[in-house]
Image (cartoon, grey):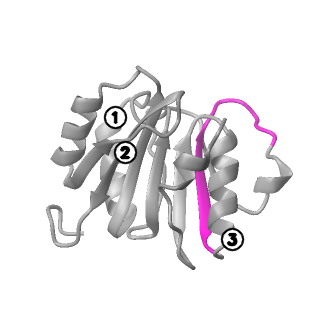
Amino acid sequence: MELGQFLELFNPLPGNHYIQITDKIDATTFALAKLISEVEGEFHLALYTQEEVEIPEALKEIKIEYINDFSKPFRALARDHDIVIFKDTLFTHKNPQLLLRIAYTTLANTGDVIIMQKKSSMDIENTKAMLEKFEFRAPNAIEVLPQYDLVMAKKMHMWGNGL
């Protein structure tokens, strides 16, 4: 998987916190963990899995939350993250609206939410509308990975939900 264009979406600053919510560890997980560690930030992983997962050595230092059921939410502190990345989980979850509310709450002002789904498995226009409904602004579909559709939006300070 060529990740150059994908990684250009990120501009981590010292102390930034990123969280990826996914159902499997893959090249994006490793790349994001490495990128954020280079600026002494924190990378968190919320892993939806029912199986025991062998954590690779490169990820031994990150905070991992295991979630065994797609009806349960991930946990994150308010305003603790600068970017929230959903990969193949938002629309598998029984309550995607709950996940977006948690994402909004955990994002710092001007933080970004990224939704990645396998190519052609996400209705991009409906996803952009759903993000707007949850007070995320400027949603855009971005072509950076050939095997994924990706929509990115921003949490704007003093807009909407008051957090």
Q: Which range is magenta?
A: 41-54
Identify the residue under disc 2: 99
**Considering the numbered disc 1 on the image, is that residue within a helix, a strand or a loop?**
loop
Q: Nearer the viewer, mark 3 or mark 2?
A: 3
User: In the figure, residue 68 lies in which quadrant?
Assistant: top right
Residue at x-position 24% and y-position 54%: 136
Position of 101 relative to 88 (above/below): below
The amino acid marked with disc number 2 is Leu
- Asked whether residue 91 appears in the rendered view, the answer is yes
At 16% from the left and 72% from the top, the residue drawn is: 158
Calculate the distance from the C-alpha at mark 3 to the C-alpha at mark 2: 28 Å
x and y, in percent, of residue 147 in the image: 54, 27
The amino acid pointed to by label 1 is Asn
Q: Amino acid at mark 3?
A: Glu
Residue 31 in the image: state x and y as whole percent. Answer: 67, 52
- Residue 63 visible in the snapshot: no
- Tell me how far mark 2 sits from mark 1, CA to CA: 7 Å
Q: Is residue 139 magenta?
A: no
Residue at figure coordinates x 38%, y 41% from the top left: 142
